[in-house]
Amino acid sequence: MALFQPQADGTFVVGIEPAVRAWIVEMAEALEETMGTDNPDIKRLFPTAYPHDPERDAGYQVFARGQQIERKHSAIETMRATVDSKTFTPEELSAWLGIVNDIRLVLGTRLDVSEDDRRIRRKDPNAEAHLLYRQLGLIMEYMVDAASYTLESLANLLPAVVDGQQSAVVNLFDDEPLLIAQRGGKLVGADSVKAWVRESTAWLASLDASVETTTIVSTETSVAHDAVIWINVDDHKIDLPVVVIGDRPSPDHGFTSIRVYHSTWQYADGGTEAGSGTTADPGKSEFGLSHPDIIGVPDIVRHFIHHLESAEFDAVRTMFADNAIVRPASGDRFTAKGNEASDEFLGQLFDRDRLAKIQLMGIVDDGTSVVFEYQVRSDLWLGSGVGIIEQSTDGKISAIRIAGNGRRATPNQL
């Protein structure tokens, strides 16, 4: 039997021996004790954002590292609670997968493992540790393979791309794959998608990439996975916001189409030519989605878009809660909080001196978070991407995260 056998209700029967599970939790708890320390073995879990500016990096780490540690603590608590469970939910499987990956990263750092380390020599004093590293890798493979059958989330797609698991991506689809990516364009059929995975894997490997999930928003017919891909560019570790959105007939079916948005302002020249965007013509949708101008758009998104299109920036500011958080497309390092949040959002996404035309392309609303796909154009500028809004109890925006790109338009595109 597979180590994680998918069930019709979306859960997984766990085939790992109790002793092995207890052993993994024990390692997770040992990891937990080091997460707030300066132990060099955990450096890959918390990448340095500003290696040449220690003071600036220290400020970033105070904000970002605290959030990451909190998520890891929560995942380890889930592992403790489910160590004897006969089945895992997709969320529980995701928690185990994330921490097993962390343990393996720490062990690999300690052993200074490279891709060329394929043989384990008996006389090597670290032979047992190398064997443990490989065993954890095998368990991870089973977890990722199981997650490829999970129809409730797309959280496995990005790790599968990073690891080069072409079949895991194709298996997400119900029939002939249709994937649209800002880096790759419109891809139809298993062969095209597999070729995209191969090319993307090589690109991400050159950047020493790793994936961190932020949140998952799911409804009966749509799923949105908001994540960060950490990449290495010119000896700088920076965060690349990515949002993956999938459409499906129902939770019992695979996806009919998947769209991948990511930002590249972090390492592009000023952002004006950052990426190819998703469509060549701002008046046409590559996605083939209906335009939800009236039906199905939550009021908070409708009012937000209206104020932006009308350049009513003071009205935009009033929509943000006092303690709001904004993660712009330029990544976590530029996250703003409190009174600066709305100004950071406006400054990153729009030129305040020009009116912007925004076209909504899709909505995913699970009652807590709202994900909206958009295309935007203003004077000599085209863009597309995804926004994720979290709403406070008083109806204001408590958080918004953006992933997307823009480029200069030719005169015939305006």
Image: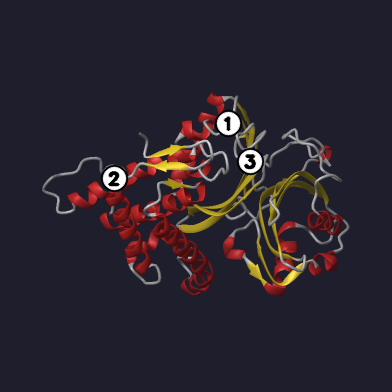
**Pointer 3 residue:** 182
Residue 5 lies left or right of residue 137; in this view the side is right
Residue 377 lies left or right of residue 70; in this view the side is right
Give the camera-side residue of 160 and 241: 160
Give the camera-side residue of 239 and 365: 365
Kind of element beneath mark 1? loop
**Pointer 2 residue:** 135
Q: Amino acid at mark 2?
A: Gln
Assess disc 2: are there few (<14), some (14-19) or many (≥20) residues with their C-alpha within 10 Å of its C-alpha: few
- The residue that appears at 59% across and 59% down in the rendered structure is 331
- The residue that appears at 49% across and 43% down in the rendered structure is 11
Spatial distance from mark 1 to mark 3, Cα to Cα? 19 Å
Assess disc 1: are there few (<14), some (14-19) or many (≥20) residues with their C-alpha within 10 Å of its C-alpha: many
Of the two numbered discs 2 and 3 in the rendering, the one whose residue sits closer to the viewer: 2
> Which of marks 2 and 1 precedes in the sequence?
2
Q: Amino acid at mark 1?
A: Phe
Of the two numbered discs 1 and 3 in the rendering, the one whose residue sits closer to the viewer: 1
**Pointer 1 residue:** 173
Give the x, y percent position of residue 185: 64, 34
Q: Amino acid at mark 3?
A: Gln
Q: Quadrant of the N terminus?
A: top left
Spatial distance from mark 1 to mark 2, Cα to Cα? 30 Å
Spatial distance from mark 2 to mark 3, Cα to Cα? 36 Å
Kind of element beneath mark 3? loop
Query: Does residue 210 show up?
Result: no
- Which residue reaches farthest left? 123
